[in-house]
Image: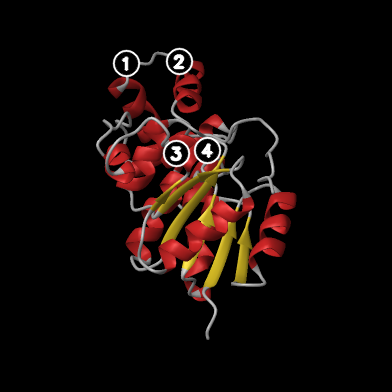
Amino acid sequence: MKRSRIVLADDHTLMCDALKNLLEPEFEVVGIFADGLSLIESVAALNPNVIVLDIGMPKMNGLNAGKRLKQMMPSTKLVYLTMNSDPDIAGEAFRLGASAYLLKSSAVTELLGAIRQVVRGGLYVTSLMTKDMDGSYVQNFKLRKSTNHLTPRQKEVLQLLAEGWSMKEAAFILHLSPRTVAFHKYQMMEHLSIKSSAELIEYAMMNSLVPAMTTAVPITA
């Protein structure tokens, strides 16, 4: 029987190595990426059935990358494996096309089960986030009000600026002109009633648009 093709996206090398060793007896790991931008630029050639990705990745976070991926490869399943247990973030992930959402503190067997389920066309949410919910867990998350008020392109620009890239560098990474990046920056500040770059970066961190500055916690056995 042909094994499902899996791509991994996480900026922590040890996490990717552990996941590869975990998955390869049952699935075929065909690619590993360390940031969301390289993922969306190169993944189509690998033709994966499932992409396991983190929320907090440099250059382009997992939510922005996931939105792009579902537009490019609508049949590919997205499985989020993250440290972020915020129900609003989980809701946003499912609204953007996720098939599963797990935490890095989840058990190994839970990740394997989630991938098997999404390959069959199902949906999955880690039990660590659903213990107080009634009814459809995924629907519960999808119905949560979105807290994002920026366009996808604005979020991409904001993430790069919040990571410390200059407007010129962000323009190069996103294949835009510096003038266009500046336009997006000041449009965001006006839209959000923000008066300084520091406040804009704080907004990015509060809305999980930049990776958390913490060490990844491997999933437990």
The span from disc 2 to disc 1 (Cα, nearest Å) is: 10 Å
Q: What element carries label 1?
A: loop
What residue sits right under mark 3 in the picture?
157
Identify the residue at image location x=34%, y=27%.
188
Identify the residue at image location x=37%, y=16%.
194
Classify 10 Å Cα crowding around label 4: few (below 14), some (14-19), many (20 and above).
many
What residue sits right under mark 2 in the picture?
196
The span from disc 3 to disc 4 (Cα, nearest Å) is: 5 Å
What residue sits right under mark 1 in the picture?
193
Q: What element carries label 3?
A: helix
Dot 4 or dot 2, earlier in sequence: 4
Pinpoint residue 93: horizontal percent, then vertical percent. 38, 44
Pinpoint residue 186: horizontal percent, then vertical percent. 36, 26
The circle drawn on residue 160 is 4
Dots 1, 3 in contact, CB < 8 A = no
Q: Quadrant of residue 30?
A: bottom right
Classify 10 Å Cα crowding around label 1: few (below 14), some (14-19), many (20 and above).
few
Classify 10 Å Cα crowding around label 3: few (below 14), some (14-19), many (20 and above).
many
Pinpoint residue 187: horizontal percent, then vertical percent. 32, 28
In the image, taking residue 63 as reference, residue 29 lies left or right, namely right
Dot 4 or dot 1, earlier in sequence: 4
Q: Is residue 48 something that shows in the picture? A: yes
The span from disc 3 to disc 2 (Cα, nearest Å) is: 16 Å
Name which residue type carries label 3: Val
The span from disc 1 to disc 3 (Cα, nearest Å) is: 17 Å
Question: What is the image's colouring?
Answer: secondary structure
Dots 3, 4 in contact, CB < 8 A = yes
- Which one is nearer the viewer's eye here, 193 or 136? 136
Name which residue type carries label 1: Ser
Dots 3, 2 in contact, CB < 8 A = no
